[in-house]
Amino acid sequence: MLKFSKVLLVNALFLLLTAALLFLAPFAKPRVLQANIASGETNTADTVNQQIKIQFSRPMNQLNVEKNFQILPTIDGNISWANNTLFFTAKKVLQYHQKYTVTINNEAQDIYGRPIGKNFTYTFQTKNHQFIYEDAHDQLVLSDFSHKVQPITTDKVVKEYQVNSLTHTVVYLSQPQENGNTEIYTYDWVTGQTQRLLPNLKAHLSNLKMTGDGTQMYFLSEVPDPNSPPDQNNTILTVYRYDLQSRKLKDTDLLKTFPTLVRFWITPDGNTFLVNDVNGELFLRAIQGGKSVALGMFADYRGGDAKGDKLLFLDTSADFNYVEGIVMYDGDSHRLTSPTEISTNPFLSRNGSIMSYSYVPKDRHETEGQQGVRVVELDSGPKIGKVLFDQYNPDVSLEMSELSADDQLLSVEVYAKADLADYTHVRKYGEPNKPENSQLKFFNVSDGAELLTIPGKELTWVE
Amino acid sequence: MHEHEATHETLRLHTVVQTVLLGLFGSFLMYLKVANVLAYYVRPDYQMFTFVMGGVLLVAALINLAILFGQRHQLHVTISPAELSQVFLFVLILTLGVFLPRRSLSAQVAALRGTNQNLLSGSQLKNLTLNDNASPLLHTASTLNYNIADWIRLFSVNPEPDNYVDKKVNVEGFVQSNADGTFTVSRFVVTCCAVDATPIGLIVDRGLNDLKTDDWVHIDGKLEVKEINGQRQVVVEPSDVKKIPQPSEPYLY
């Protein structure tokens, strides 16, 4: 009997304790458990495309917290919730090199109406504009306008490279002199580590591509065909897929059934191959198998918006008297640029609303190949709208251009007129060797101001 | 002398019944695996474990029976009311297990546990965490191989609906009808077994038409944002809805 009552007593105590906790819970003050803060070092600083997340200790009165949320300087954005965490998603990318202050006012309440009691404030600093390019010694370099330079390669012959800002990774192909095989490397610019991938792969590699999420890498492999007659050096071309997360080769026979493959690209959403065949025709083909859709006689794919809804090609078709121009594909093809003005090298902004491209003025088609650069708004239609920036200088040629993620800055590859002689006439037919002495110029899009000139080429902005 | 001792070792009927029940339970678990319906109750990586444990129970019961009848016992046939109720309980469970139809959890259970708005957390998120910068990831990653759990995991670490606009959807699940005439394509996420199954789903912005609750469907389409009850929500704008048979593994993990 005594034992029994002891058990009862212990049970009763536990019950009381639970009841007390349940009763007291609503009286405990809610608080912020964590918010995302990153340090101010340039390479690890918060990127301009991230969300602000604030996790609370308990379920909050969402409308009330939203009223008590503030970010300075003010940015337009949406608030959404997952359980007890508030997310602020800016409509555009944040400004580069900007200090932001986020505050949750002390009146923000939980679902019981209890306020957090004191202001929660934190600040973060976004990174500078950063870019990767090939310097005068053909080495890859990460740099910014404060001239903080971080070498990526020091002694490699870089053939191609791709950048992914989300995974802070550069992948590049390098071709040593001693043999024809190609080496693949990754470089992480936060950790500063270089790693060679697939060291045992004996093939000639090209067409290096990365999906927009930075998880998959694709490249074209060319190996001698074992069934080739001895007098013909036939080769087999296939596309390989390498998983950058698991660091494993996943596919080695993609596009094998595409008999006349010359070059390929991946759409920004990672769903579709774009393939050029030997005749210069461009095809769309789902990566996970499926039929090829012929798009037309478009020479080249030149990127798209971040979602992959709008893709840009080069058009050299007879319809336009072979005057090279820019085509946008959004399910249908639309020639954007004039049928009489040579235009090329398009670059589409992240949200697909602004494009930069180079052009040869009409009156100079026959005589000279120097190009100017324009930045234009794209109106629905789609067609070219307002011109935001236009530069032409007959002494130099302004070639590949690229807009920074915030559309504020424009980088342009520049060649001196004297170096252009061989270059211009082969430019149309694939990938000519670019002149040696190239420079990179940086402009402010809004006022056209020239900011900086450095020797180098092949620039990619880092977000 | 020897015989006298033996007569004291009475074998109680209750012990025999208990042993037989143990063997039947073991056999039943093994049968569920063999009949390929264990997927309705436990997650795949626990199935072999369950099968082996069934085997262990069966072997233990057989050994026990062999020992019991190997010795010379006197069978003691009376059974107390307490023992009887215990046996009854086990027989009832076993009978229900054997005779109730073997099927996966239904839309009715999902409705009881609540589907819309359900997010996942903790170990249900697998390798995703709130600190993942999943937002830009979404802008570019191919989503055609995402199942409903993959989507809800993303919504749980990144709830902003605008991130998902125009993302391609290719999912399978069962139909739950919604009050506003649309329906939700749902699945259960199972961490261990059917008891902890959490219903999750994507709202499909279309009427039921010829679909009924609990029908299994394959849905192709894209995601859109729609305001429902004053809240911006991700919904599926379907381009194709096909009825399909229930998959052999109805739950997601």
Image (cartoon, grey):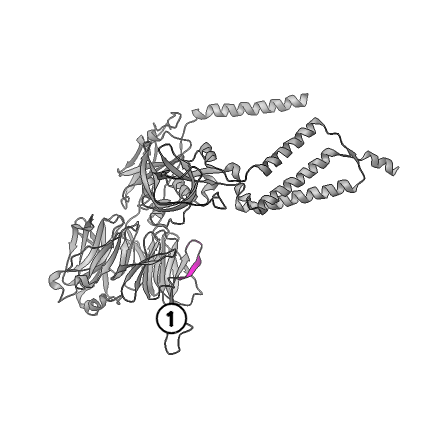
Q: Which residue is mark 1?
A: A235
Q: Please, is residue A119 above or below residue B63 in the view?
A: above
Can the viewer see residue B15 in this picture? Answer: yes
A264 and A229: which is toward the camera = A229
Quadrant the N terminus of chain A occupies: top right
The answer to which quarter of the image holds residue A429 is: bottom left
Q: In this figure, what is the number of numbered marks?
A: 1
Task: Name the chain under label 1.
Answer: A
A381 and A165: which is toward the camera = A381
Residue A270 inside the magenta-drawn segment: no
Give coordinates of residue A120: x percent, y percent.
Answer: 35, 33
Give coordinates of residue A143: x percent, y percent.
Answer: 30, 55
Q: Residue at x 60, y 42 (%)?
A: B29
Give coordinates of residue A153: x percent, y percent.
Answer: 35, 61
The answer to which quarter of the image holds residue A337 is: bottom left
Q: Please, is residue A433 above or below residue A147 in the view?
A: below
Question: Magenta span: helix, strand or loop, mainly?
Answer: strand
What SS does tag 1 mark?
strand
Judged left or right of residue A437, residue B49 is right
Can the viewer see residue B130 in this picture? Answer: no
Residue bounds of the magenta highlight: A244-253
- The amino acid sitting under disc 1 is Thr
